[in-house]
Image: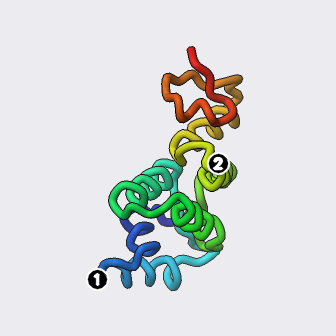
Amino acid sequence: MIGLDAKILVRYLTQDDPIQSPRATEIIERRLTEENPGFVSIVTMVETVWVLDRAYRLTTNEIAAAVERMLQIDVLVLENEQAVFNAMIALKGGQGSFADATIAALGTSAGCSRTLTFDRKALRLPGFKLP
């Protein structure tokens, strides 16, 4: 397994750099295999979504589609894939940010009864409560 960082994923998804994008495509589409997949950590996923949102100003639906695409790539192993999927669904549904939804999903899978927050937007997600 080979770890991938957010810059590889962003270049692959956006195809915006004449040198790095083809290299990222080569890695994901030709070098990685199901026997030797690419590993995408939960931190990498959150950073990738943050970059697509802040730097590229993609819409929520475009970001959700990019996450869904990564979930469907057979040669990628996403850490805590269920949390990523749940966060993508929450993002699509306008319930909260990808990061907040990931925090909620990870807390739930760790056995947390709730996650305390002062973030009013995060309170739209199940599992978040005011202290």
Name the residue carrying label 1: 19
**Residue drawn at point x = 57 percent, y = 70 percent:** 37
Q: Secondary structure at mark 2?
A: helix
Residue 129: image location, x then y, percent: 62, 22
Image quadrant occupied by the C terminus: top right
Is there CB contact under 8 Å for labels 1 and 2? no
Image quadrant occupied by the N terminus: bottom right
**Which quadrant holds residue 51?**
bottom left
Marks 1 and 2: which is nearer the front?
2
| Residue type at the position of mark 2 | Ala
Mark 1 burial class by Cα count in 10 Å: few <14, some 14-19, many 20+: few
Mark 1 vs mark 2: which is more N-terminal? 1
**Residue drawn at point x = 57 percent, y = 72 percent:** 36
Q: As rendered, which of 33 and 129 lies closer to the eye?
A: 129
Q: As rendered, which of 48 and 27 lies closer to the eye?
A: 48
Residue 31: image location, x then y, percent: 49, 81
Name the residue carrying label 2: 90
**Which quadrant holds residue 115?**
top right
In the figure, 23 relative to 4: above or below? below
| Residue type at the position of mark 1 | Ile
Residue 111: image location, x then y, percent: 71, 28
Residue 104: image location, x then y, percent: 62, 36
**Residue drawn at point x = 65 percent, y = 73 percent:** 74
What's the distance in space between the residues labelled 1 and 2, CA to CA? 34 Å
In the figure, 23 relative to 43: above or below? below
Mark 2 burial class by Cα count in 10 Å: few <14, some 14-19, many 20+: many
